[in-house]
Amino acid sequence: MRWTAILLPIGVSILLVAVVWWWLTYREVIHYAYLSAREASICLVGRSDICELARSLCNGAHPVTFAKYWWGTFWIGFVFASASLTIGDGRRT
């Protein structure tokens, strides 16, 4: 069984979902200048008080209808994608 063929698409899909979910959560934060895009990008990969504060301020004025972004999603996708590249397809050159 080729683990690369399974893990890589799953990992990339999860990474894409994480980025889209992050953008849907933080686009208002960036738009209303609670955080710059650079500062908000930190929220993609980790949790910080500034991310929570900016999102709370924005959600108070512009509530979202979906679940708040969880940064662990990015790292799960990263682990799957990395594992696929580390494991390889089992062929030796």
Image (cartoon, rainbow, N blue to C red):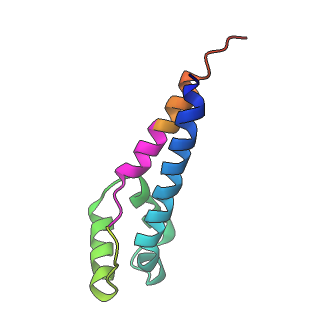
Task: Reply above or below: 4 against 93.
Answer: below
Residue at screen point 54% across, 30% down: 84
Q: Residue furthest bottom?
A: 61
The quadrant of the picture occupied by the C terminus is: top right
**Image position, residue 69 (x, y; %):** 36, 63
Residue at screen point 30% across, 59% down: 48
Residue at screen point 33% across, 81% down: 58
Task: Reply above or below: 82 against 12.
Answer: above
Residue at screen point 31% across, 88% down: 61
Q: Quadrant of residue 49?
A: bottom left
From the viewer's perspective, tell me whether residue 3 is left or right of residue 47: right
**Stretch in magenta:** 68-79
From the viewer's perspective, tell me whether residue 26 is left or right of residue 2: left
**Image position, residue 27 (x, y; %):** 46, 75
Task: Reply above or below: 50 against 82.
Answer: below
Nearer the observer, 50 or 82: 82
Counting every numbered tag in the picture gives 0
